[in-house]
Amino acid sequence: MGLEQFMNEAISPWLKEDGPDSDIVMSSRVRLARNFDQSPFPLIAEEEHLESILSFMEKGFNHRTFQQYKELEFVQMSELKSVEKQVLVEKHLISPHLADKSTRGAALISKNEQVSIMVNEEDHIRAQLYFPGFQLEKALEEAFQLDDWLEEKIDYAFDENRGYLTSCPTNVGTGLRASVMMHLPALSITRKINRMIPAINQLGLVVRGIYGEGSEALGNIFQISNQITLGRSETDIIEDLKGVVEKLIEHERHARTLLMDQSELELEDRVFRSYGVLQHSRIIESKETAKCLSDVRLGIDLGFIEYISKSILNELVVLTQPAFLQQYAKKMLTPNERDVFRASLIRERFTLEQREEY
Amino acid sequence: MECQECKENKATVHFAQVINGDKTEIHVCQKCAKEKGYVSPDEDAYSLHHLLSGLFNPNPSALHQPTEQEKEEREIQCDKCGMTYHQFARVGKFGCAMCYQTFAEHLNPLFRKVHSGNTVHEGKVPKRIGTDIYQRKMVRDLKLQLQQAIADEAFEDAAKIRDQIKSLENNLNQHGEGEA
């Protein structure tokens, strides 16, 4: 059951719920990197070590339930097709590293896909927890409980001075990476974001686009995360990040108001052009899709478009990614075929949405 | 914007490197970015992990001949996983938990660079295996206070602190026996 759902549903169940400030903050994530005390780290470990960690994790945690996170499903990378692994990456349930590099990798994924514990990634354990909207503190609180729950069975590599020991020096100490996914269309349209990123970097935080690729943020979606993990407590790290995200929300809202005051018609035009493209195109690339989805989402937030649910956009962001498209089409597609299939899928999805209205 | 390395192609890889607040902006083309090792072909372009290896070598010039001392340092090897310091400096990743002790004396400068001056963990301690760690930390702190008290000739305080240390150490010993 589990794996099938992970593969077929574009939108993770938890992402269907609305969180605080969800017009701007799409999701909050907390990830903790941990290692077994007595075993070499995955990058240099022998197969037998990795195997023993895999079977330890499978025996200890497969089908177990942690609080409201039901039935962790143990998914082994070696048993997945490459397109299936890619789907999990596109849904942010596993990292590209786990999908591509790790031969003895696995992930324990909760039924609602809110918890994902990667095994034998760069570290033995990378436990992550997602929350919809802006809920960093809640995410940290539950990540701590998840960590304690894992620690009941696992002897962690921990040093009094260095904290949790990790494969990479950039994670040592708390092993914490906290991040938020933000939709910042108004700051992008007005180009204010370019001036803000360097300032955010100065504070030890990192800004990147969700699809990776250099500094370009497709679909105006940005990920903000902490870089420093040593010498600051988890709570302080979260507080810093939270402070910056609050400022960004404030600036984005302000920029939206300014845009509405100064060029409402141009904005409305932009929104409906993009809406038209999504509803009617026959061939569409992922880049254009991301741009149009961003405009339509902004249109919904500003009240130009009233009859589309916000979650359809979260869904389409994932659904229109290369691997998910192919999973949906149930066959391999060339890039050109993908653009055609993507266009028809989006048209279908919008038609469905409108029919539900009547 | 043209590439700052070859001055021929358009710069398509842009990033800022911030180390302890000193910011350097780097604008290069894809080709130079790969050649200079800013990006590896199939990975995230501006992950700090890839910039890390440069931090280990203060003088990365090819002309730089390693001194005898540097050669010795390179050969320090972790008993547990076999990783040498040279390998660690090249890949930028530890091999196992023991490496942190093996390379201990070289780590502070590195951690300072990566974690904006910090070298010591503040934050969560594992619940189960951490109890002893808390108590040991307290013993260490108390021993420092004891020395200070003796130096200040505050013998009454010193006696109190000594008793506290004793009781903590007894606790720790009993705990140890209980586990064995």
Image (cartoon, rainbow, N blue to C red):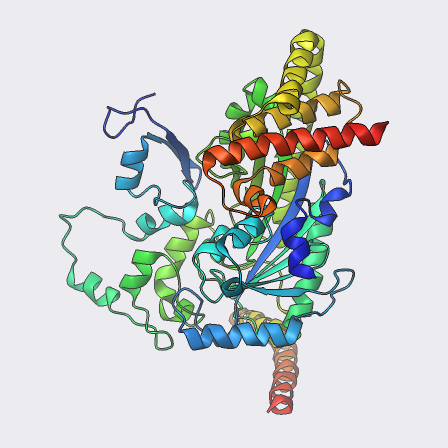
User: Whole-percent x and y of residue A282?
Assistant: 57, 25
- The quadrant in which the N terminus of chain A is found is bottom right
Give whichever of A293, B38 is nearer the camera: A293
> How many numbered marks have been drawn onto this rendered protein structure?
0
Q: Residue at x 71, y 9 (%)?
A: A261
Q: Residue at x 75, y 32 (%)?
A: A352
- The quadrant in which the C terminus of chain A is found is top right
Q: Residue at x 63, y 21 (%)?
A: A280
Q: Residue at x 41, y 49 (%)?
A: B49
User: Whole-percent x and y of residue A97?
Assistant: 47, 54
Residue A59 in sight in this render: yes
Give whichever of A354, A202 is nearer the camera: A354
Q: Is residue B6 left or right of residue B104?
A: left
Give whichever of B165, B135 is nearer the camera: B135
Work out whether B175 lies above or below B157: below
Q: Residue furthest toward the right?
A: A358
User: Whole-percent x and y of residue A145?
Assistant: 71, 63
Q: Is residue A336 left or right of residue B27?
A: right
Work out whether A191 lies above or below A115: above
Residue B131 in sight in this render: no
User: Whole-percent x and y of residue A350?
Assistant: 71, 29
Q: Is residue A141 left or right of residue B11?
A: right
Which image quadrant for residue A55? Answer: bottom right
